[in-house]
Amino acid sequence: MRYDLVIFDNDGVLVDSEPIANRILAAHLTELGHPTTYEESLRDYMGGAMHRIHEVVLERSGERLPAGFDEAFHRRVFEEFRRRLEPVAGVVEVLEKLTANGVPHCVGSSGSHERIRVTLTKTGLLERFAEGRNGGGGRIFSSQDVGRGKPAPDLFLYAAKEMGVAPERCAVVEDSPLGVRAAVAAGMDVYGFTAMTPAPKLVEAGATALFDQMAELPALLQ
């Protein structure tokens, strides 16, 4: 493969969490007096870190979300994740092919480290990323590790640096416009997964190529 590192977003790319999380987020915001539909949650928040929710609500309403918002949201989401979360169809086979070809890969997610580990543990994917990199800690990188989340490039640049790979030698796999924009800003090729996001939105954000089935990805990375 022509890349020295493949960086996977987590939610919606490795684990099929976006439908669960965004339904809960829309309901939670609505309960707090900020009416939000599932479709609006996908449009406005999918791919972003938690601080984006606070920023958007404050900008639109002039009101701050309550101090315990993050904890209450995560409590609900993790309960559902542990009950019924599944890996994205075909992603295990993709990871196995990358491993067989000796292509390093890691996670670069807007989610917290706790959220990443809850989702990867439930779906049986954690062991594929938890082993050390050059004897270090694992190959899981979160927006918690950097100052700014997506669409800023900080997370992807940090992951590449920690993995010892130049940005131009990295490919990113993303399913949200925010994530695509972050990868483009980092100077990386980015492959847009269209299972949850209309293709034109990922094209507009700057995706290098698009795919709608995980089985298509290995050929695109060649």
Image (cartoon, grey):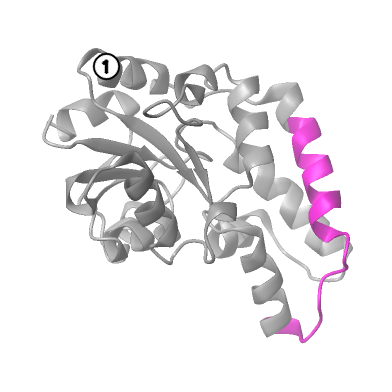
At which x and y percent is residue 187?
23, 60
Q: Residue at x 78, y 68 (%)?
A: 35
State the residue lying farthest toward the front. Answer: 135
Of residues 131 and 90, the one nearer the viewer is: 131
Which secondary structure dominates the residues rendered in magenta? helix
Residue 77 lies, with reference to residue 128, above or below; the image says below
Residue 212 lies, with reference to residue 215, above or below; the image says below
State the residue lying farthest toward the bottom. Answer: 62
Do we see residue 43 in this rendering?
Answer: yes
Q: Residue at x 36, y 28 (%)?
A: 134
Mark 1 Cα-neighbour bin, 10 Å: few <14, some 14–19, many ≥20: few
- Asked whether, in this view, residue 15 is left or right of residue 170, the answer is right
Quadrant of the image occupied by residue 19: top right
**64 part of magenta stretch:** yes
**145 part of magenta stretch:** no
Disc 1: which residue: 97
Q: Residue at x 60, y 54 (%)?
A: 144
At which x and y percent is residue 211?
27, 38
Quarter of the figure with the N terminus: top left
Name which residue type carries label 1: Lys
Of residues 143 and 64, the one nearer the viewer is: 143
Dot 1 falls on a residue whose secondary structure is helix
- Asked whether, in this view, residue 185 is left or right of residue 82, the answer is left
Query: Which residues fall within the magenta stretch?
Result: 60-80
At which x and y percent is residue 125?
52, 20
Do we see residue 193 in this rendering?
Answer: no
